[in-house]
Amino acid sequence: MAADEPSPGPTTGPATEQEWLAAYDPRAYTPIAVTVDVVALTLRRGSLHVLLVERGAPPHQGCWALPGGFLRAGEEGLDEAAARELAEETGLQGSGAEAALCRLHLEQLGTYGVPERDPRMHVVSVAYLAFAPNLPDPRAGTDAAAAAWHPVSDLDLAPRSGDRPRATGVPADTHGGGVDGHTGPHPIRLAFDHARILSDGLDRVRAKIEYSPLATAFLPYDFTIPELRAVYEAVWGEKLHPGNFHRKVLSVPGFVESTGGTTERGGARGGPRARTYHAGDARLLHPALLRPTREEPEPGEGPSTDRTTIRP
Amino acid sequence: MAADEPSPGPTTGPATEQEWLAAYDPRAYTPIAVTVDVVALTLRRGSLHVLLVERGAPPHQGCWALPGGFLRAGEEGLDEAAARELAEETGLQGSGAEAALCRLHLEQLGTYGVPERDPRMHVVSVAYLAFAPNLPDPRAGTDAAAAAWHPVSDLDLAPRSGDRPRATGVPADTHGGGVDGHTGPHPIRLAFDHARILSDGLDRVRAKIEYSPLATAFLPYDFTIPELRAVYEAVWGEKLHPGNFHRKVLSVPGFVESTGGTTERGGARGGPRARTYHAGDARLLHPALLRPTREEPEPGEGPSTDRTTIRP
DNA sequence: AGAATAGTGTCTATAAGACACTATCGT
DNA sequence: ACGATAGTGTCTTATAGACACTATTCT
């Protein structure tokens, strides 16, 4: 194993604790920064949006980047740091915002630590995935130069050279855009390797709403089946059959629970009122809501390999 | 956002680059250590084993822990560090070991960074999951005091207080043991939060062999369907129907490819020779090999919540 | 010979998708 | 009145699992 101790993981070593304490001075090591970045997703006007902030300093000055910041050493864990950053960035920490934030879903996405990902120093970033229903516009009191929701279809998610495939969760199509259909005229490029992080996050969401009731996290407490369908359509970027979707959702035990009520008005373009539901207590969807089987992209090569092989 | 810059993620700030360089001294910050821990799994005599090392220094001296070590700042990425640690720990870096290591699968599992997880300092550990076919005994030339494969059924994986649930991948039964049936007389407790890390790793493997051809990574290049079934049975801890399993595996396109040959001898306890296969080129199993539907553990409460809610 | 296993055939219950149809609402 | 939508019914096909059966090999 590594000759250098400390930390969980490194195991033995000839040193007793005293010897170790004497020999080890953390400040003598080349420092590594630990940050937390958040891929915050929400649904606005029927399409997926991600929260971005504009960098006010080099490198990548003027570029858009994922919100994030330092892990406060000794003071907080990773989950707390992610929640804090998101609250600060959206300016939603104050009262009155609980309605939106209390339904926030936060989960760890993956960690990115290639030495070259930041020109200044070796930065290890723990990425988090967050989604919540229709979050308001940010800036409500933040110190960020600019923070805004961007449609993910406006972003350039094409894999850049230097970004190696990462391995987490289900590999899926990493071909950017697609969620909304139209990629804007001049796709926005993200700073650092944030395009890859966002791409991994999107893959994760697309896969996860298949077998978890997570899609309900994009909606307010009460919602209708057509609204839930709109979430799936926005995330997967595909139209779903309304009738079959409706029956399928109701057939999964614990996915949704009827409130007994209906909406006040029918759809915007007509139609009867829809019944309202709220999320059930299932943590796993059984059976799952499988994505429509796009034809296999021929056996040439999968999108992302999801395999790391050691080189001796 | 955080007032303190640097790093990808943190975005703006009033500072120009010069100001930033002047204001920021990494050595002035409370240091955070970044380590890489590896959950290395293999199959030995039909049951799942995990690689552990015995700690030779406090804290947790004498306890078993996951192999791991420092990330070398500025020199290596996380994936490389994990591969390096594993090679060092197993003593398999030399020649002659490629046969085993070239089939190694390595993927990131998750990152653990609660400040209290190590009494000495704030340590952020990036955990990796590794598996490979029937790895040999370690110690072949390592500096570890003791490293050995342990049946996972001998370990105490009950959630300890202070370990908060983490959120990655599919939640599954986190009730330890079970894989082998018999939990040993005195279950081994792991150092730090390594029981939770291992538990998360097991959950990940159990879920992932459902929809990925990963189970073949536990086997040599050529294998038989009954051997593949043994992998599933060991990982899931359940007997599977031999006939149905056989047909199902062959029905998934790209999962296995026939070599045309058979084994030299029949089974140890009789039976005809089995045909041999090797892994196909599918990266995703379509349709998936779903786990047998254990009855829902009643709607009292899911095993692990997989939800983190921000506290305003 | 007897026991255990590899592999196949068959039947049933369930789930997914295509399609048609009715009822309700907005314009 | 008309168009769009919510929700249900029905039919076809694919899949999962239970079970039976044959053939092959070890002891």
Image (cartoon, coloured by chain):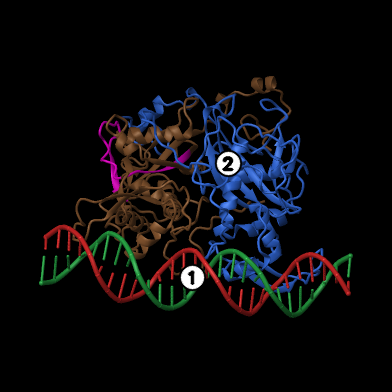
Chain colours: A blue, B brown, C green, D red
The residue where tag 2 is placed is A127
Q: Which residues are magenta?
A: B125-151
Q: Is residue B247 above or below residue A260?
A: above
The residue where tag 1 is placed is B298
Task: Quote the CA–CA distance across marks 1 and 2.
Answer: 34 Å
- The residue carrying pointer 2 sits among few (fewer than 14), some (14 to 19) or many (20 or more) residues within 10 Å by Cα, namely many
Same chain shared by disc 1 and disc 2: no
Residue A81 visible to the viewer: no
Identified by mark 2, the residue type is Ala
Provide residue A104's location: percent of width, then percent of height: 65, 53
Q: Quadrant of residue B210?
A: bottom left
Judging from the image, what secondary structure is the residue with disc 2 in? strand
Can you tell which mark lies on residue B113?
none
Residue at the spot x=62%, y=37% of the render?
A: A158
Residue at the spot x=74%, y=70% of the render?
A: A274
Q: Nearer the viewer, residue B302 or A237?
A: A237
